[in-house]
Amino acid sequence: MALVSRVLVAGAGIGGLCAALALAKQGVHVVVLEQAQALGEVGAGLQMSPNAMKVLRELGLEPELSAFAFVPQHAAIRHYKTGEYYLKSPLGEQAEARYGAPYWHLHRADLHQVLAQACSQAGVELVLNSMVTAYREDAELNQVYVLLEDGREFYGDILIGADGLRSKVREQMLGEERPTFMGQVAWRGVISASDLTVDVKPDACVWAGPGRHFVSYYLRGGDYVNFVAVEERSDWQSESWREEGDVEELRQAFADWHPEVSQLVAAASSTFLWALNGRDELPTWRHGRVVLIGDACHPMLPFMAQGAAMAIEDGYVLAEYLLRYEWSVALTKYEQIRKPRATKVQQMSKANAGLYHMHGGVFGKAKLRALQAAGCFAPQVIQSKLDGVYGHDVITRWAKE
Ligand SMILES: Cc1cc2nc3c(=O)[nH]c(=O)nc-3n(C[C@H](O)[C@H](O)[C@H](O)COP(=O)(O)OP(=O)(O)OC[C@H]3O[C@@H](n4cnc5c(N)ncnc54)[C@H](O)[C@@H]3O)c2cc1C
C-alpha cells in the first residue's frame, strides 16, 4: 500500500499549517501555497478550548505557546446592563482536570507564528505570494496539479484546500456560490490592559443584550484585553468582508451597557468590522485527490469560539488518516468522521445567537433564566453540553483503532 509522500496545501491559515505540521513531522514532503506576500494574522484573540489544545500539545507546541497564553477562570454569560450572571462555569484548573488539556486564550498572531516556525523546522516548504486559482487531476500520473494565478504549477499526491471562507478549491469542487451573510457583524479589537480604567474579570465573558452581544477576555498573560462586539444587521453593503470599523459608532452602540463594556470600548483606539458569513452543510468535502478542511468547508458563526478549533481538529485527523491509509480510504474516513462533528458545532454556534441576543422577547429572557437555574440546580446539564465539544479527543481515538 503506497501512502502519500508529497502533499499540497492551499492556504497557510491555522488549519492548513496544522495539517502541514502533522504530516511533515512524519516525513511527508508538504508544500503550502499561500496567497499573502508575508505571513501574518489579524490583531485579534482566539479562545482555544481543550479539544484544540490536545492537538497543539500533540504537535509539541504547548511549551512555546504557554508563554503567550492567558488562562481564564470562568466561562460567563452576563446581563448587558446589570452585569447579573446567567452562567458562571469554571474553566482554569477545573477545565484542565476535567478535559485533560487547558482552556487558553491566545493572540492569533502568536499561535500562527508558533505554528509557522514549527512547520519550517519540520521541513514544510512554504511558498508565499502564491494564489491558487485551479487544480486538475492527472489519472495516468496519479497526481493532482495546482495552478497559481501567475501561471506556476505544483504537483502532489493530494491537495488539501485550507483556503478559508472564500476557498477557490471549494469553488472548483462544488461550484461558485458565495457564503451567506448571517445577518451579523462583529467589531474586533485588542486593548492594552494598562489603558483601562475598569477592572475586567479574568473570564471568557459574553455580555448578552437585545440584538447584540459583547465578548471580552484577556490575552498574553493579562497584558491585553480582546473584544468582539456583535450586532445584528439586515445587510452588508460593502464588497469586502472585513474593513476598518468606526470606533465612534462602536462606542455609541455600547454606550449604555455595563461599565465593564462601555469603558472597554471607550479605551479602544481602532477596530475592524467583519461581516459574519456561513454556509449550509456541503454535500461533500472531497473529490478525487482533493479535500477541504476548516472554513473552506464549514465556516461557522463564532458563537461557540470553535471555528479555528475545528480547523485544527480537521488538520490533525486528516493527516493521521493519510499517514495510515491509502489516500482514497483516508479521505473517505476523514469525511465520515469530521463532517458530523463540524456540522453539529456549526449548528450549536448558530443557536447561541438567539440566546446571546435575547431573541423572542420574554421567551428569550426566559431561556437565559433557565440557563441560570440550571447553573444553580443542575450544573451537570450545562456541563454535558460543553463536554461534547471540549471533551472531544481526536488524539486518543488513534490508540483505539
Ligand atoms: C469575530 C470572530 C471571532 C472568532 N473567534 C474564534 C475563537 O475564539 N476560537 C476559534 O476557535 N475560532 C474563532 N473564530 C473562527 C476562526 O477565526 C476561523 O474559523 C479560522 O481562522 C479558520 O481557519 P482556516 O485555516 O480554515 O482559514 P483561514 O484562517 O481563513 O486561513 C485561510 C488561509 O488561506 C489563504 N488563502 C485564501 N485563498 C487562497 C488562495 N486562493 N490561494 C492561496 N492561499 C489562499 C488565506 O490568505 C489564509 O492564510 C472567530 C472568527 C471570527 C470572525
Image (tube, rainbow, N blue to C red):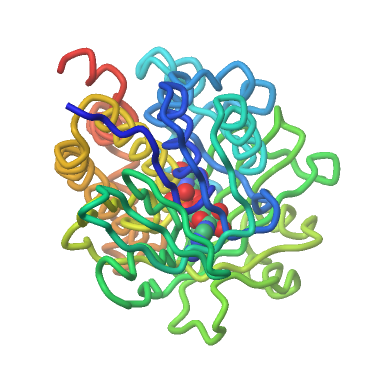
Would residue 207 be visible to someone looking at this image? no
Q: Which residue is at 39% across, 38% downward? A: 6
Which residue of the protein is positioned furthest toward the bottom in this rendering?
A: 237
Q: Is residue 101 left or right of residue 201?
A: left
Q: Nearer the viewer, residue 153 or 318?
A: 153
Q: Is residue 233 above or below residue 321?
A: below
Q: Nearer the viewer, residue 401 or 205?
A: 401
Q: Which residue is at 32% across, 57% downward? A: 297
- In terms of image quadrants, where is residue 257? bottom right
Q: Nearer the viewer, residue 132 or 308?
A: 132
In the image, residue 25 lies at what x, y percent? 46, 22
- In this rendering, the count of numbered labels is 0
In the image, residue 156 lies at what x, y percent? 38, 46
Q: Which residue is at 55% across, 64% downward? A: 186
In the image, residue 359 lies at what x, y percent? 33, 67
- In terms of image quadrants, where is residue 174? bottom left
Q: Is residue 325 left or right of residue 389?
A: left
Indicate the quadrant containing the N terminus: top left, top right, bottom left or bottom right: top left
Q: Is residue 156 left or right of residue 191?
A: left
In the image, residue 187 lies at what x, y percent? 61, 64
Q: Nearer the viewer, residue 216 or 198?
A: 216
